[in-house]
Structure formats: C-alpha cells, structure tokens
Image (cartoon, rainbow, N blue to C red):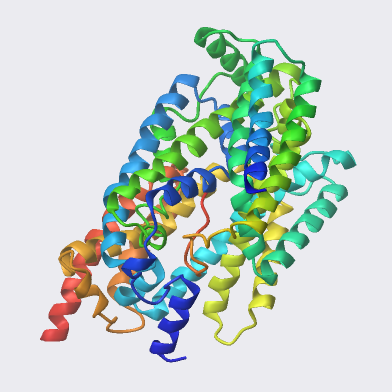
Amino acid sequence: MSNKDQNHADASSGEYENQPVPKHALKGGDKFWGMYAGEHAAGTEFMIGPLFLLNGVSLQNIVLGLLVGNLAAVLSWRFLCAPIATQARLTLYNHLERIAGKGLVKIYNLANGILFCFLAGAMITVSATAVGIPFDMPMPALDDVYPNSSSFVLIVLAVGAVIAVVAALGYETVAKFANIASPWMVLVFLACGLVALDQLEVSDWAGLEAVWSESILVAQGGSSESTMGFWSVMFFAWFCNAAMHVGMADLSVFRFAKKASYGWASAAGMYVGHFMAWIAAALMLAAQIKMSGETNPVPGPMANNVVGLAGIICVIVAGWTTANPTIYRAGLAFQAMIPGSNRFRVTLSAGIIATIAGMFPAFAWKLLTFVGLYGTILAPMGAVIFFDWHFHRKGQAANLHQAEASSPFNLAVLFAWLIPVGIAVYLIQTQEIAAWFFPLPCWIACGILFLIFSGKQHKESHA
Amino acid sequence: MKTILNILSLIGLALTLLPSILLLTGALQAGELHVLMAAGMGIWFVSRTLRETLFRPTEISTHAVEPDAPHTL
C-alpha cells in the first residue's frame, strides 16, 4: 500500500495512525475524562491495593503516598506528554519511527509484546480466582510460585483459551463491552470499599488505623516491619504508568485532544482507579483478614466476601477486559517483528504464552515489581521523544512531520535506551533495589545520552 | 425508548452503589446487599447494551488499535 493509500485508509477508519490527526477529528474534553476514569479501574487494581497491605505500608503512607504520587503522574501527563501530543498529533509508534527508525521501533515493540504477555498472564490468574469459586478450586497461596492444583491449571487454561481466541478474532466487541462495563466497575470498587469498612467495624480514622495495623501483624506473622514507606508508595504511584506519561505511549491518546490542558483528565484515572480503587481493594483484604484470618490476596474470594456475585463478575470482567486488549496488542507487536505472518496465529501464540504465564501465580503476586520493571524498560523511550522534540525540533511540529529517520536503526537512540535500562535491570536483580525507583533516573539518563550520542552522530556525518 | 433505557441504566448504577451506603448506615443486611447489587448489575448491563446497540454505537476508543499502545494498569 502506498503512503497515499495508507493515509486514506487511516482517515476512513478515523484512527490516523500514519498521519497527524486533522482538526475536524479532534475530540472534546469529556471523552478523555470518561476514558481515563474507566481505563484505570482495571483488573490490576484488585491486586495492587492488597499488596501494599502485605508489604506492611501504614495507612497514612498509603494515603499520602498515593495523593502525591498520583499528582506527579497527572502533572507528567499534563506537562510532558499532552503538549507534545497536541502539537505533533502523531502516535508514539509513528513519532518514534521518525527519530529511531523502523527497525528499532520493532525491537521496542518486541519488548512491549513480551511484557504485555506477562501482564495479561497476571490478569488471567486474577480472572481464574473468580471463575474457580463455584468449582471449589483451591486458591493459590502467596508463596506459591508454581500452579497449586490441577483444577487451577484447568480453569486458567479455560479462561486463557477464551481470552486468547477472542483476542485473535479481533477485540472490537470486547472494547465495546469494556466501555459499557467501566462505570459499573468503578462503582463496584467503591461499594467494595464501603462494605469492607462496614465489616471492619470502624467509626473513625484512629479505629481504622488500629485495625489496619492488626491486619499487617497477621499478614506478616507477627511482624509490623514495612518493606515500603512513603517514598516507595509515591514513586510506585507516579511510575506504575510511566510507559504512558513520561514514556509517551499516551501521545496516541492526546493527539485527538483539542488542547494540552486535557492532560488534566488523567486525574480521573489516577484518583478513581489508583487512589479509590487501590484503597478499596486493600480494605477488602483487611476485612478478609479480620473475618477469617486469611491473608491470601486472591481477588475472586475477596470480592465475593464483600459484595457477592457482583464482586465475582467484576473481577472476571476487570481481568478479562485488561487481558484481552493486552494480548491483542502483544500479537500486533510480535506480528510487526515477522512481516507477512498471520495475525490470528500470532495473537493466538501470544495468548498461549500469557496463559502459561497465568498458571504461575508468582506473576500476579509480584505485580508491584513487574509494573516497576515495565516502566523502567519502556519509559526511557519517551525521553528520546521529549529531548528530541525540545532540543532538535525546537518544539515545531513541521520539523518532525518532514523528518525521516536517517537509518532503520538509530544507534544513538539504541544505546541511549539500552545503557541506563541495562544498568537498572542489573541493579534490580543483584542489589534488590525496588524497580519503581528506576524509571525516573533511567528516563533522565536516556534523554541526556541521546543528546550526546545524536550530537556526535551529527558531527561525524558532517565531517 | 431511549429515555426509558437511560432511566434503567441509572437505576442499575444506583442499585450498585446505594446498598453499600445503606449497609454502612445499618439500614440493610449483607444478604440483601448481595441481591440488590446483583440486580443492579443485570439492569445496568441489559439497559446499557440495548442503549448502545439501538441508539448510539460505541465510539472508537482514542486508544487506537496499534502495536505500541500499552493497555493501562
């Protein structure tokens, strides 16, 4: 397909993947507020909140850390991502291709695809814990790395198969269903938190703090030691979506925005999904500990304990609507690596990888570390876009729209990305430093290295 | 028809949230809450699906179907 044909196809689909979004296709602010509120109340929320409690975070640190960290995330969307998106009006993929070259973008896609498979795997585990309730499936325990029973394996296989086949057929229907389910899911999260508060039988903040501390003692077998403080919660809240804001993946979203100020809409996602929903999910685990002494943060039974059938369905829907597009996009990422490959088969293969990952509950239990690693690996590419935009393009969209990458593998971008990420992954593995502390230094280092390397490259080509 | 479906959707959402508030105030029992929330869920999904199908096809998400857009967490 020629560029002209491609642009025509883009325009008729309304997605404008290979050209700047034209003025008539821009969307109003309400679309962004609704989209962010819905998309950040997902299956992962059921896991993240309880994991804070299990790490012994005090209630005060959770509330303050989330307030500040989410504010930093909103500011990142508003002042780093949205201004570039509303001027360049390109997708991340297209924008990066003009700087880094098609070949390097494929490698970036591969990293995305692999991480997507494991994220989808964790969501399949989440859904399976809800589907398994009527079958009396033994729930995986917190120290289970491998599958704990044959029934768990069978249910993960069934859930994974459905999600993979639907994703391989194209996820449009699921996307429509997710849009319908979003407002309801947000209210179920809120209801779960309120019912959990009732089960905790507290009437004031002091009472809640006391019950919370008792829950930590039970969860940690008598120890009140916290492995996460204020800074951990703050950095986690800021960078759990690092790939989207400082990583610039949401250029794809805000390119449709009339003004950069629509970046404030991300506050709906942060304070509904990453504040209210995380705290509600954490309260669900505290209530479960109080009522049964059970410390396993298994989403299905936790939601069933507080709101019954609606909770079980919410866990299934939240896990499914997160896993499905994730597998679909993993399939597309892998397909970009193998030209001419069949999308159905590639997506199905991504679904099989995700399903196998879903059989290992450790991926769900280690979600905090995984999410930190996800941001550390993907976000630095956003620094390349940010520094290129402000230093090379001088903030002028025309300079970017006329640009083409000098080679399919821009080595300046490749090394600027790999050096800090390699060091960070090494430190995470060997020094056991929490992964959520690395996206920021990696992002800054990647941007500075990109300027140095691209400056050298420019001098050499003109020598 | 559209107005009726809109009202039903709102009833579905109300039945999803209000029982938990009533439980907190002591006006409702846990068993009743479960039934009301399940009813709210059914009403919401049926009315909203009908509304979207009959009157306004769901808009294409601004998350374009493209290889590089990660799903949110």
Classify residue A251 as left or right of residue A153: left
Identify the image quadrant of residue A211: top right
How many numbered tags mark residues here? 0
Identify the image quadrant of residue A69: top left
Q: Is residue A201 above or below residue A308?
A: above
The single residue placed furthest to the bottom in the displayed view is A2
Q: Is residue A244 above or below residue A252?
A: above
The single residue placed furthest to the right in the displayed view is A135
Give A440 or A97, whichever is nearer the viewer. Answer: A97
Q: Is residue A190 above or below residue A202?
A: below
Q: Position of residue A48 (x, y in %)?
A: 57, 38
Q: Residue at x 63, y 48 (%)?
A: B2
- Indicate the quadrant containing the C terminus of chain A: top left, top right, bottom left or bottom right: bottom left
Q: Position of residue A276 (x, y in %)?
A: 52, 31
Give A441 or A189, whichever is nearer the viewer. Answer: A189
Q: Position of residue A361 (x, y in %)?
A: 70, 46
Q: Residue at x 42, y 91 (%)?
A: A2
Q: Residue at x 13, y 79 (%)?
A: A459
Q: Residue at x 36, y 83 (%)?
A: A408
Q: Is residue A75 above or below residue A63?
A: below
Q: Is residue B61 visible?
A: yes
Q: Position of residue A355 (x, y in %)?
A: 72, 59
Classify residue A385 as left or right of residue A269: left
Q: Is residue A301 visible?
A: no
